[in-house]
Image (cartoon, grey):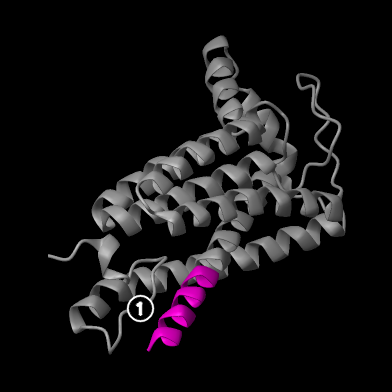
Amino acid sequence: MTHPASSGSGPLGASPPGPPEPEEVRRAGPLLIAGSLAVVACVLLLGILANAVREQETFWIDTVGNTFMHGFASPAMDAVMGTATFIGRNVVLLALTTGIAIVLVARRRHREALFLGVVVIGSMLLNSALKLVFQRPRPVLPWATVPADYSFPSGHAMNSMAFALGVGVIAWHLLGPRRGAVVLCAAVTVSALIGLSRIYLGFHYVTDVVAGFATAVVWVAIVIWAFRAAARRRGNSRT
């Protein structure tokens, strides 16, 4: 059996020469369809939320989301959510990204290391730009002391989801679908907890977090497409 990392047909690799085998089409078809639908759904959702924020519309879920989450407040929950929000800080994500990239480079996986760096650093830069574009004020809540910057989209949610998807894609590419799916699910679960922590602590509205997740999905899809397109061009130039 060919190892997924050496086949060149993973999510970051160029497609192998010749038409795909029927078995490959059968396995990849549902996944590609589901992934494409997810990206399209995220684009539509992001468009709706961005337009509403620009028009200063209020979503009902934002009016009740923070209070609902704060209803679960306890010392234990404070500790869990505080830890989750700490993991989602840029400095932590950058440290994790750097550590993984070093391991990948040591194993001569330069392409995967570059991919993760582009995904995470690009997400952080894009998030900063989007916040300046929309300039949505953060929630004003009696139990929260929020930073003096903008709220939409949530940087913790967006950057942690971009990191999670990037790590999941690399694991899928190097370890195969089964183990890659386990890594992806675990990473996305942690990212979801980070997003919830931002609502619980009163730092973001629900729609800030949802928009952050949606933007991360779209961003990672763009980076995957760019890497695959570059791989195809290199493959064509060698033939």
Residue depicted at 41% across the width and 56% down the height: 169
Q: Crowding near pointer 1: few (<14 within 10 Å), some, many (20+)?
A: some
Residue 32 location, quadrant: bottom left
Foreground: 3 or 151? Answer: 3
Residue depicted at 60% across the width and 28% down the height: 85
Residue 88: image location, x then y, percent: 59, 34
Q: Which residue is mark 1?
A: 15
Residue 142: image location, x then y, percent: 81, 20
Residue 220: image location, x then y, percent: 55, 60
- Residue found at the far left of this picture: 1
Q: Is residue 182 left or right of residue 217?
A: left
Judge whether 143 appears above or below 178 on screen.
Answer: above
Q: Is residue 131 left or right of residue 5?
A: right
Foreground: 11 or 107? Answer: 107
Residue depicted at 40% across the width and 84% down the height: 238
Q: Is residue 30 magenta?
A: no
Foreground: 41 or 2? Answer: 2
Q: Is residue 61 visible?
A: no
SS type, badge 1: loop
**Magenta span dominant secondary structure:** helix
Foreground: 146 or 92? Answer: 92
Extent of the magenta region: 225-239
Residue depicted at 47% across the width and 51% down the height: 113
Quadrant where the N terminus sits is bottom left
Judge whether 83 appears above or below 66 on screen.
Answer: above
Q: Is residue 65 left or right of residue 98?
A: right
